[in-house]
Amino acid sequence: MVQASDTLLSVVVCAALIILTSFLLSGYRKRNAHLPPGPKPLPIIGNLHQLPDLKADRAVAFRDMSLAYGSDILCVKVPGMLMYILNSKESMSDILVARSAKSSSKPPQVMADLSGWKYTVPSLPYGQRIKTSRRLLHKGLGPSAVQSYIPYLERESAFFLEKLLDQPDAYKKHVTHTAARIALKIAYGYEGVTDDAHLIDTAVKAMNIFCVTATPGIWLVDSLPFLQHMPSWFPGTGFKKQASQWSQTVLYAINHPFEELKRQMAAGTAGASFAGRLLEVEDLSDPEVEDCIKHCSTGIFAGQFDTTTAVMSWFAVVMAFYPEVQKKAQDEINKVVGHERMPVVADRDSLPYVNAILKELLRWRPVLPLIAHSVNEEDEYKGYYVPKDTVILANVWAVLHDESNYDEPEKYKPERFLRDGILDPSVLDPATLAFGFDRRICPGMHIGQTLLFILMSRTLQNFDIAPAKDAHGKEIAIDTSAVPGLIGFPKPFKVSLVPRSNAHAAHIRHAAENARSLPDKLAIFEL
């Protein structure tokens, strides 16, 4: 993972006069405004010295701070930025859903913008471009569109299992490669690139860059945008050289596959894809529409496989750490599906325990522990003044680990989502939080959950997952804590994947051979 750094000294040198003037003139727009509780800020630097650093789990730290102040809403100030941190479902529903017209913008992400991510959906402020982008993404990733992708997803999963059979020690590599192949096919569809290791590697690097540059409160230039226009000798502008280097990686990931698709379309050799379909049917007289298609395709390509890799990595950790959970899921699959065929999406409603495993993964280790919004006009909530441009940080992890929502939240228990053998609708569904809120909800949530079900159910049917062993035959301990960051990945781990029997191994080979006999084509969505 690439690393970010701006020293506190640079913060003080650059920000002192500007922040002091801002505080004196406006007091965040209202000198005597009633703000939520939080740690007392210092002049100039605010609460910068009290924020958890990049190596700490910020979601946990903010939850603990919320408990210490006895408030589900915290107020934190950093140079040039006011942050309200929401730690309850009620506050998230009230502010991010019920008042989404005011709270669906994004906080300043100047560093992410300078690094090449300016026009992608996660970076866009609320306005016409994001409305256009979401309209396009809904066409290609909505529930009806996902149905057309299912045969391809099931085909690719057969190759995933075969790779696990041949190289069981390279689990994460196989997950990443499979998710990348699928994302590339859906986004761009053209032949040959799905095995381009360089493009996949570049996309991974580009997503790492986004994760580092899009974290609120980390980069001084996000709080003081004028710094991007200052000469490189000015204190605190070391970010400019780094952003320039990163932008080469990001812009390659954005532009190269899209231009290659257009070339193949002109030659009549392009396969069906999200981008190709929209280039055919959309009115491209407005150049921004084509640019939106390009950046939406990047979002599918780069974002889909990164989040899939994270969840599937946690899946392996959990199955190895909780063998009793794995056994229950395998018994359910044996009963419903049997051994003669692979689980398919049509089996999903008949496999409630497998569904509960996925729900509990999204709850126990959410992919996005913290989700940032900003308000585009001033507001008031429960007597608290909410100034325009306030950053709203939804602590999703805190809600999903709140004892008032889930009993024993630190334990991984799929059973919490079941009652009388079926999914219990009265239990808070983690997906209502894990994929974002209202006008900024993740458009890939439907295909993401569908792909995860396919990969998980088929892996469970055919493999036993256990902790790996060292050279002395001793199990290697698994750390179930997350690596701090924008996306919650597990710490490095090793697991053992063994086919459940020779018959299961033969089943995997047979499924892969059948998959090879099918065309490597995507059935594109209807408009």
Image (tube, helix red, strand yellow):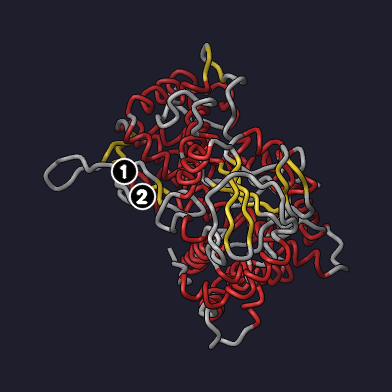
Q: How many marks?
A: 2
> Closer to the camera, 310 or 383?
383
Q: Amino acid at mark 2?
A: Lys
> Closer to the camera, 472 or 240?
240
Which residue is outermost to the top?
Answer: 420
Residue that numbered label 2 is attached to = 491
Q: Compared with residue 33, is residue 128 higher up or lower down, i.e. above or below? A: below
Q: In percent of the image, x 57 and y 67: which residue is there?
A: 44
Q: In percent of the image, x 36 and y 50: which residue is there?
A: 491
Q: Amino acid at mark 1?
A: Asp
Secondary structure at numbered mark 2: loop
Q: Is residue 339 left or right of residue 24?
A: left
Cα gap from disc 2 to disc 1, whole angstroms? 7 Å
Other residues around mark 2 within 10 Å, as few (<14) / some (14–19) / many (≥20):
some
Which residue is outermost to the left?
Answer: 472
Please provide percent x and percent y for residue 80: 63, 65
Q: Is residue 97 left or right of residue 398?
A: right
Counting residues from the start of the chain, the first of labels 2 and 1 encountered is 1
Tag 2 and tag 1, C-beta contact below 8 Å: yes
Please provide percent x and percent y for residue 107: 66, 58
Residue that numbered label 1 is attached to = 479
Secondary structure at numbered mark 1: loop
Please provide percent x and percent y for residue 188: 65, 60
Q: Compared with residue 419, is residue 197 higher up or lower down, i.e. above or below? A: below
Q: Quadrant of residue 108?
A: bottom right
